[in-house]
Image (spheres, helix red, strand yellow):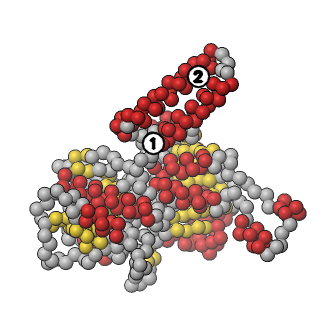
Amino acid sequence: MADTNVTRPIRILICDLIGLRFDAEGCPDHSELRAYIAEKGGVFHEDALERDGDLPPGLHFFYQPHLSSRDELIAAAGEGQYDAVIAAATVLPAETVFPLGGVRIGAGTGNMGSRSWGGGTGEGGEAPLMNTPGINSRATAQMAMKAILKVLPDLPVDWLDALVSTGDFDTGRQLRDFPTEKLDGKRIGIIGYGNIGRELAKLARAFGMEVVIHARPRHRDAIEAEGFLHAETPLAAAAGAAVLSVHVGLGSLDPLTKRYANAGLVDAALLNALADGAVLVNYDRGELVDVEALGAALASGKVRHAAIDADLFRDAATGALSGPMLPYLALVEAHGERLELLPHAAADTDHPSRVAGARQAVDQIVDAIVHRRVVNRKGTLPEGYTDGGAKRPPGIGPVCLDPLFADRAALEELSALAREQVNLLTRLGAGALPQEDARRLVRLMTLYRTRLERHHLTGPAA
């Protein structure tokens, strides 16, 4: 960033908290991002942009995480006061203007509604829209798995702890009263084979679950190669599942109905296809679930527990609530004990992921401004820009062989392991192997697999 050849001040708004640990004064600590921007030659400002303020040429980042309401954002950025924006969970209204582009920290861009790039899909507009996919995928998948583990296995841990802590339990007589269903062998239906869906699938498999994934047909080979089952429809993924988790995003917005393509995807038919007493996890977008249908499924016992992570906003002046979590609140009185409602916190409260995503977002917005190069593009590529392809953390998303080509030692080790396995397998095919060679073959196959995982060579092809 130091050699940017920027001839005028470029104003970049950061409108979400970056540091989610606390400093000595008890405030969220954004020092890591401040240092990164300074290291790259940019200027970090904690004060608000002044309309008539003089700034020297260069890249100026204005950290304003307090901006949240529609009116605040329009007032701050409705007239192009900022050239570009970096956001995470903040919902940018269509009336906001950022002529040089925007980056969403994390996957998806449904909250990035600025008309500068045509709204959250990035279709149309004169500025590029980008995100940082994969940055918080593991954090989100781990939180989704945690939500499942709170209910399955269904051992009442708190109750047993209370009994044991007071000495009010006899293992020999009473343990039989607490039978437990294990996760092993239970089916989980996952809708979506993006970064988060795939990470959750790997976690579920580690617990011995049968993983069924619905995704577009072009993903079938990769899904099956990883040992998962492919479902042609969402209904097929839900059929008989003890757990259903959805990770597809909102999809495109219909300009006439103002409805997203995937809104209400988890409807009555999908919920009724689940096994009795199933668990629903929606750590994606609140709108993906038909809330009325979920209420009916909770009432009937078809769904025993629902974990939802969605935005909830409260107007500072009036206290009025809004956001996709709002419809779920109507279920609390009747089903509160079987609901777990989070304010879209599963990924956004992970400090290392947020900082890593912010650094990547800084790199991407600067790349777009200075070099007219768009990395992790969403929607259309505006005129005058080049497509810089995709960037994800190692091991997240499609496999890229480029790093392997540069690591000759790793390539040679994999080649040697593969050759020895082929030799032993050929001998096995011709007749029984001596026990010592058979043990070596098993060891080689295990070692080869772990080396592939170490070099991030398992998964769908780029």
Q: Secondary structure at mark 2?
A: helix
184 with respect to 190 (left or right): right
In the image as oriented, which residue stretches furthest toward the top? Answer: 430
> x, y percentage for residue 231?
55, 41
Return the residue at label 2.
425
Q: Nearer the viewer, residue 35 or 219?
A: 35
Above or below, 44 relative to 315:
above
Q: On residue 456, which mark appears?
A: 1
Within-10-Å neighbours for mark 1: few <14, some 14–19, many 20+: some
What is the three-letter code of the residue carrying label 2?
Leu
Taking the spot 14% from the left edge, 72% from the top edge, the residue there is 55
Q: The C terminus appears in which quarter of the rendering?
A: top left
Of the numbered discs 1 and 2, the one sitting upstream in the chain is: 2
Q: Nearer the viewer, residue 445 or 276?
A: 445
Taking the spot 48% from the left edge, 27% from the top edge, the residue there is 416
438 with respect to 289 (left or right): right
What is the three-letter code of the residue carrying label 1?
His
Above or below, 39 relative to 421:
below
Q: The N terminus appears in which quarter of the rendering?
A: bottom left
Within-10-Å neighbours for mark 2: few <14, some 14–19, many 20+: some
Taking the spot 42% from the left edge, 47% from the top edge, the residue there is 394
Q: Nearer the viewer, residue 253 or 98?
A: 98
Q: On residue 2, which mark appears?
A: none
Q: Residue 273, can we see it?
A: no
